[in-house]
Image (cartoon, rainbow, N blue to C red):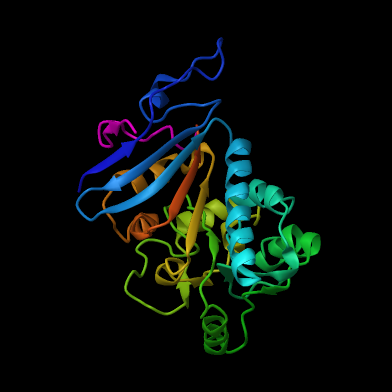
Amino acid sequence: MLFTLCVPPMVRAVRARQPVPRSLQSLCCWFRGLGNGILRDRKRGIQVHVKVFETSDGLARAAAHHAATVLNDAVQIRGGARLLLSTGASQIEVLKYLVEADVKWDVIEVFHLDEYLGLDATHPASFRKYIQERVENLVHPNRVHYVTPDDDVTVTLRALAEEVSLPIDVALVGIGENGHIAFNDPPADFTTQEAYIVVHLDERCKRQQVREGWFRSLDEVPNQAITMTPYQILQSKVIISCVPFSVKAQAVKQTLEMEETNHVPATILKRHPNATLYLDAESASLVDRNKIPLGTK
């Protein structure tokens, strides 16, 4: 499988006294820290837009603006919009800027990707709590469709499937340190066409949750979660994947350089016709320019 990352030529260094690192000069062009490109799979005609920023703050601002634009366009056309949210430490900045954006939130429906099984909604790691505090309490959307596990999980899965039966306008989808999207840890199920499923969390995923401070120890992390499937994520009209920080560099490298594989679940995003990967200098730092030839727009 051959990929080409097409970028314009470098215009100038970010700062006169702080030249762009050599490892990044061949990866992207920099306009005050911003690089733009398109990663194309020549064999299958698939592409993913790639944007590289100097800082995670710059990444978050741009991604939030992109998401707000898609939402506003949908509202103008249909009178409402549907937004799918990712959670975790890597999404905090983008959500901060998104809720500050000029969006008509009273006609926006909000969904989220996943939730732990057996975790109370008041627990600091609960994604329901995360969405409530960072979105619902601040902008009061028309409706928030929470992933709320029922005693009978099959009832929960059926209800969630009904709620996402209409297309999502824009999905914010992070990538985990193990390459997962939502809680689809490797090897992810790329074959199911269910909307949500129950999954077992792998150890690397659990370690990430502890390292980010959501749990005090591995023993506290639930073993299972409900997650939106890769298939259902790809039904979104627009996907914006925000992946900052050096801890995500290896996952980014694998996502961009490897062929689609359920052992790096994020590689499936390259199937989508309108997906954009937002990176910062740290998360983009390991991408191998020899495996991703550079061209010029």
Q: Which residue is drawn at 48% across and 53% down?
A: 176
Point out the residue furthest to the top here. Answer: 17
Q: Which residue is drawn at 34% across and 63% down?
A: 187
Q: Which of 72 and 64 is in front in this view?
A: 72
Q: Position of residue 169 (x, y in %)?
A: 54, 65
Res. 110 visible in picture: no
Q: In this view, does 76 lie to the left or right of 242?
A: right
In the rendered structure, does residue 289 fall within the stretch colored magenta? yes
* Dominant SS type (magenta): loop
Q: Where is residue 192 in the image (x, y as percent from the top left)?
A: 36, 77
Quadrant of the drawing holding the C terminus: top left
Q: Where is residue 175 in the image (x, y as percent from the top left)?
A: 48, 53
Total numbered circles? 0
Q: Residue at x 66, y 50 (%)?
A: 92
Q: Residue at x 51, y 57 (%)?
A: 173
Q: In this view, does 278 lie above or below 263?
A: above
Q: Position of residue 47 (x, y in %)?
A: 33, 50
Q: Nearer the viewer, residue 211 or 249?
A: 249
The quadrant holding residue 188 is bottom left
Residues drawn in magenta: 282-297
In the rendered structure, does residue 46 fall within the stretch colored magenta? no
Res. 265 visible in picture: yes
Q: Which of 273 and 241 is in front in this view?
A: 273
Q: In this view, does 59 lie above or below 76?
A: above
Q: Is residue 203 above or below residue 254?
A: below
